[in-house]
């Protein structure tokens, strides 16, 4: 039984596998070789947890936290982001991995930034920044709509994609507290074309942001 099933009050026999501190995040100089004259190389699949396998791979034992931490990562396009790293293997976990949701972790590639450019640029969506998820049950386009806002701002900057909005809407409508942070985006005042956020229970987000213990395997992309 995954954490998502528990949050939604599901019984084990009916649970199914679904698709899925405000503290400064330490920055580590993690940069891949980048030459602007050479097209960005594709992601190295060997760095990532295989997308198929045990559906409960990231679900923690009772009383424990998910076996993951967020680490700084610089993309082939020279963009600083935060990405999940598995504790036991050092392998990275892509935000589209459907098993994260069973651990109560929502990694969300936002939608609609192009329609809310001013709000995207005004808000702080730099990696690690706190953001807000706001339900819009009266949204004419989607009754499950969940808007994404920068902390301290009242204007929507983007929306949770429809697939994950359905599950998030159920959780938020139950009054369950979630904390959301940005994984990808820019600081206030800079053009922001793409936002990715992570949402989970506050204590889970705090754990994910905590320093990854030195005794764990080195992140795969560092060799």
Image (cartoon, rainbow, N blue to C red):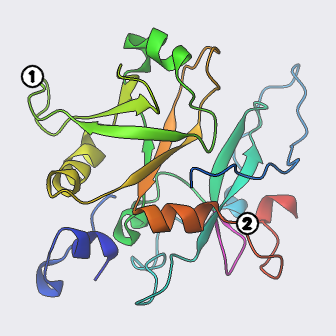
Give the percent coordinates (x, y) of residue 83: 63, 53
Residue 101, picture quadrant: bottom left
- Position of the C terminus, as image quadrant, is bottom right
The residue beneath circle 2 is 211
The residue beneath circle 1 is 140
What SS does tag 1 mark? loop
Tell me which residue sits at (63%, 33%) in the image.
126
Tell me which residue sits at (35%, 23%) in the image.
156
* Badge 1: residue crowd in 10 Å (few <14, some 14–19, many ≥20): few
Q: Given this view, does label 2 or label 1 mark the residue nearer the observer?
A: 2
Left-right relation of 200 to 67 = left
Tell me which residue sits at (51%, 78%) in the image.
65
Query: Was residue 176 drawn as part of the magenta stretch in this picture?
Result: no
Give the percent coordinates (x, y) of residue 88: 67, 81
Between disc 2 and disc 1, whose residue precedes?
1
Give the percent coordinates (x, y) of residue 143: 10, 35
Give the percent coordinates (x, y) of residue 124: 57, 28
Q: What stretch is highlighted in magenta?
A: 85-92
The answer to whether 143 is drawn above or below residue 215 in the figure is above
* Badge 2: residue crowd in 10 Å (few <14, some 14–19, many ≥20): few
What SS does tag 2 mark? loop
Residue 38, picture quadrant: top right
Instruction: Name the one closer to the observer, 22 or 222.
Output: 22
Left-right relation of 57 to 111 = right
The alpha-carbon separation of the residues under discs 2 and 1 comes to 42 Å
Mark 2 in CB contact with mark 1 (< 8 angstroms): no
Look at the magenta stretch and give its main secondary structure: loop
Left-right relation of 14 to 205 = left
């Amino acid at each position: 039984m995954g954490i998502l099933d528990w949050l939604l009050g599901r019984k084990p026999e009916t649970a199914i596998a679904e698709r899925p501190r405000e503290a400064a995040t330490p920055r580590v100089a993690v940069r891949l070789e980048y030459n602007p004259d050479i097209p960005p190389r594709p992601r190295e699949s060997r760095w990532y947890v295989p997308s198929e396998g045990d559906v409960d791979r990231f679900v923690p034992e009772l009383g424990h936290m998910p076996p993951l931490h967020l680490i700084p990562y610089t993309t082939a396009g020279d963009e600083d982001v935060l990405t999940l790293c598995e504790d036991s293997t050092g392998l990275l976990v892509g935000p589209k991995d459907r098993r994260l949701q069973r651990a109560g972790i929502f990694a969300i590639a936002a939608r609609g930034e192009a329609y809310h450019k001013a709000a995207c640029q005004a808000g702080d969506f730099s990696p690690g920044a706190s953001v807000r998820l706001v339900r819009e049950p009266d949204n004419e386009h989607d009754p499950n709509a969940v808007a994404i806002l920068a902390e301290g701002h009242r204007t929507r900057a983007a929306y949770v994609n429809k697939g994950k909005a359905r599950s998030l809407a159920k959780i938020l409508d139950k009054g369950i507290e979630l904390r959301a942070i940005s994984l990808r985006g820019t600081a206030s005042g800079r053009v922001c074309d793409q936002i990715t956020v992570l949402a989970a229970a506050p204590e889970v987000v705090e754990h994910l942001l905590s320093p990854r213990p030195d005794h764990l395997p080195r992140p795969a992309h560092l060799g």
